[in-house]
Amino acid sequence: MELISGLPEDVARDCLIRVPYDQFPAVASVCKGWSAEIHSPDFHRRRRTTKQAQKILVTVQSKIDSDKTRTGLLAKSTTNPVYRLSVFEPKTGSWCELPLGPELAFGLPMFCQIAGVGFDLVVMGGWDPDSWKASNSVFIYNFLSAKWRRGADMPGGPRTFFACASDQNRTVYVAGGHDEEKNALRSALAYDVAMDVWVPLPDMSRERDECKAVFRRGGALCVVGGYCTEMQGRFERSAEVFDVAKWKWGPVEEEFLDAAACPRTCVDGADGAEGRMFMCRGGDVVALHGDTWRNVAKVPGEIRNVACVGVWEGLMLVIGSSGFGEPHMGFVLDLKNRAWTKLASPEDYTGHVQSGCLLQI
């Protein structure tokens, strides 16, 4: 059976890989042939190699109460926020909200972590929004079907404020954080999303609560900063790198950061940025060149608290606010000419952002 009547198969496939990501479920429902095509392993590869894959930023963002916003009570509305998944598409400037599954109907777990793997978005851990009890649950949203499924729970019991990163292909890595007794953790895990299987990694050299994980091209998982149990809130400058191929950690890089700071804004430079790592430190955007961090640009004055950073194709997206309870806003930095552009953010998408991740789908 022809994919598209009257067209050669290669031309028909070329048409299907151009479908916008939010139309995948509709396309899959047309016929079995189209469904099989967009669910095939080659579909994602062809979208990427032909540069048809779309970049999107998904954030864990609180819902906005418009009445409280208009009456100046936005700060009070953050006391018991309800979190959802917001999606921003940089190319079009459009925003939308992902539907949540039945088990998440009352909002995402607070402090949950998210990572993109292929056409899946993985939501891990966090605190139950009602009981505030730490969870080791895993939920997966599939962009092809627009449906949720449960994943295997993270082994080892609930952990909070852990680092996570994806190889963008099939595996999510989790490292550090703390247990229910507030003990910082050295343990790390790998989650094969397709197989729904967790595998333990060798322990890191030291405990790392509130660390940041960055998966770098070449198969290296870099875990940055954090702090041990006895040093609550006093961040380290060190980092550890896990070589996936060798399945072992390298030696601790004691002075990876040039200043002790929360590493939550560390991101990989991605394609177009020569594989460098970036972060927002104080009021500056800095980039790692070899073993030296260099200033790239000043963070826009309207942002004092940076919540989320993403880098792609020579551009950097920074989302943050001017202070607690203030609306969140976004700016895009052209890393070549170092010029900022402010994003147009609808009121419904100015709520507090806890975390985010870039996907290419």
Image (cartoon, rainbow, N blue to C red):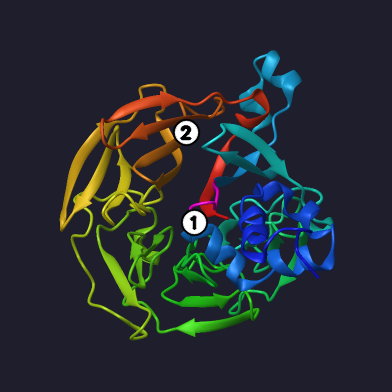
Amino acid under disc 2: Gly
Q: Position of residue 312 (x, y in %)?
A: 40, 47
Residue shown at the point (73%, 27%) measured from the top left? 65
Q: Which residues are magenta?
A: 51-55
Residue shown at the point (54%, 69%) measured from the top left? 179
Mark 2, residue position: 320
Residue shown at the point (77%, 66%) measured from the top left? 2
Magenta-span inclusion, residue 117: no
Residue shown at the point (43%, 58%) measured from the top left? 210
Q: Position of residue 131 (x, y in %)?
A: 74, 55
Query: Eyeballing the image, is 161 above or below 86?
Result: below
Tell me the mark number nearer the camera, choosing from 1 and 2.
1
Task: Decide which of 78, 151 is in the foreground and name it.
Answer: 151
Would you identify the image quadrant in which residue 230 lies?
bottom left
Structural distance between the alpha carbons of marks 1 and 2: 33 Å
Query: Eyeballing the image, is 29 above or below 249?
Result: above
Q: Are marks 1 and 2 in contact (CB under 8 Å)?
A: no
Q: Secondary structure at mark 2?
A: strand
Query: Eyeballing the image, is 290 above or below 297?
Result: below
Q: Identify the image quadrant of the C terminus.
A: bottom right
Mark 1, residue position: 50
Task: Decide which of 275, 54 is in the foreground and name it.
Answer: 54
Would you identify the image quadrant in which residue 222 lies?
bottom left
Q: Position of 324 compared to 122: left or right?
A: left
Q: Identify the image quadrant of the N terminus.
A: bottom right
Magenta-span inclusion, residue 52: yes
Q: Earlier in the sequence, mark 1 or mark 2?
A: 1
Q: Position of 4 compared to 269: left or right?
A: right
> Can residue 79 be seen in the rendering of this structure?
no
